[in-house]
Amino acid sequence: MDFFGVLQLVGGLCLFLFGMETMGDGLKRASGSKLEEILGKLTSSVPKGVLLGAVVTAVIQSSSATTVMLVGFVNSGLMQLRQAIPVIMGANIGTTATAWLLSLSGLEGDSFFVQMLKPMSFSPILAAIAIVFMMFLKSEKKYNIGMVLIGFAVLMYGMDIMSSAVKPLADVPEFVSILTMFSNPVLGVAAGAVFTAAIQSSSASVGILQALCRTGAVTYGTTIPIIMGQNIGTCITAILSSIGANKGAKRVAAVHLSFNLIGTVLFLVAFYAANAMLDFGFLHSVVNPADVAVIHSLFNVASTLVLLPFTRGLEKLANLVVKDAPEEKKRDTTLNLLDDRFLENPGFAAAQCRTVAVKMANLTRDCIFAAMKLMTVFDRDQCDYVYLLEEKVDRYEDAMGAYIVRLSRLDLSEKDNKMLSAILHNIGDLERITDHARNIAETAEELHRKNLAFTPGAQAEVKVFMDAVKEIVNLAVDSFEENDLQKAGEVEPLEDVIDIIHAEVKNRHVRRLQEGICTIEQGFILSDLGTNLERVADHCSNLAVCVIEQEKGEFDMHHFLDDMKKYDTDGFEEKMRKYDAKYKLPA
């Protein structure tokens, strides 16, 4: 092979790898977070886990990506190790889909139908459709489909260029002698493992082997051990991903490696023992791309069938390799859902952000409710609980903000971008509500410490005030959690009523002060309490309006609120009258 042949080979390899990456990215974007959600939830039985692993991997064209997701699931507590094992087995089967697609390049025949089945015939058509989808159709879904098609077309062109570049190697004695050396099972397995680990993709590694088959110098004796090694080499991605993860995630990587190692050892021992007795003559026969796909599939299906009954044994082996040890919990377990590994699948990472945000909203509700309860009956433990929740929500805001900033730089769908923008708006309001909850708890603590109490009239007014705030918090959090526009529409009228209640409580306090019924110190405390309650309602209004505006794709809250009140949108005045009657201060 001359200098220009080497350039052609390198160029073909680059196009092949780029096409595979582009096609995989397009498939992930087109599927969004659905496949990952299914993978995380529907693994209740072993057969179902195998099927899901195979389907998801066939769709996203990467067993490494599937296994990395499993590492993340186990690390975040979404999945148990025993659920992940069948999915790993299925992923090994699903990854063979790429080899079957690439094997189409080896079709022989002169008929129009057979010619059109060849990738180099239909790839230009797919590329043309892809360009139309990506450049002229204003649809994100069509754009993602276009990415898949253009990726496949580039991949096949890269494959064809590689095949043409390596064809002359059949006449190079040194190349043939290297391939013959790899017919040694140990060397063949090592070569396949090292090369696949280097490029971190068994699909790409198998595709390159299929391209080499076009030289006519690759035999079954060479192909079989290399494919065995490729299955071992692909484990490197999961191993690297598990670094820094918890014990469960490390065990996922251990299972992946042990499954492929055991399968390879069993297959090679059985195969070469049979060869020693029967002398398989076909080992010296030349293979074509379709033969590579068949060997790849047979090995992975056979390994799964043999080891499937021993999933518990693989689990015990992983537990033995990665021993239990006391682990320090450095962060809330919910925040494990914001796993860096999920950034490889932005759609799923966005869904995880939503899950954490809902958890944060419910913690906020618990915090403000616990704080208001202290105003009725003070309890030291309950007060400390409020402080604990406030600190926890602070950590949620910091972690969520940092994670969303990183996620926003990735290739997200328009829907996910809108959702993340809304969450960024929301987490600040949720954190501020817990700050006001802490202030209320400190107010209750001050009353308790100084042995003070509000007058009976003020107590009755505060009860009505807090009941209204409890309802607005419930409406805001529920509307955020459920994306419920009806509940969100109830928040702003109630917020206006709470403003009226706040003003009336202050007026009544001034009258009591003038009459000498209460003291200035009680008045300061009551004023602080009222201000915090009223501001909690303001933040609830922001949450609800954000839910409504998210549906419209806008975030001009002030304009929305002005229109709602000015034009009596959705019966605003009627809702206000309802809440005004419900939360009437006692005479």
Image (spheres, helix red, strand yellow):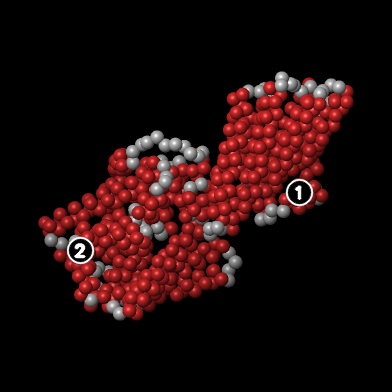
Whether residue 439 sits left or right of residue 502 in the image: it is left
Whether residue 474 sits left or right of residue 61 in the image: it is right
Circle 2 residue: 183
Q: Where is residue 115 drawn, in percent x and y?
A: 37, 76
Three-letter residue code for mark 1? Leu
Q: Nearer the viewer, residue 94 or 8?
A: 8
- The local secondary structure at tag 1 comes to helix
- In the image, residue 551 above or below residue 216: above
- In the image, residue 198 above or below residue 515: below
Whether residue 393 sits left or right of residue 314 in the image: it is right
Which badge, 2 or 1, comes first in the chain's sequence?
2
Q: Quadrant of the N terminus?
A: bottom left
Q: Nearer the viewer, residue 453 or 74?
A: 453
Q: Nearer the viewer, residue 274 or 154?
A: 154
Q: Where is residue 75 drawn, in percent x and y?
A: 44, 44
Q: Where is residue 483 drawn, in percent x and y?
A: 63, 46
**Is residue 469 visible to the viewer in this orientation of the structure?**
yes
**Crowd band around label 2 with a 10 angstrom C-alpha radius: few (<14), some (14–19), many (20+):** many
Circle 1 residue: 561
Whether residue 371 sits left or right of residue 254 in the image: it is right
3D distance between C-alphas at marks 2 and 1: 75 Å
Q: Which mark is residue 92?
A: none
Three-letter residue code for mark 2? Ser
Q: Which quarter of the picture shows residue 288?
A: bottom left
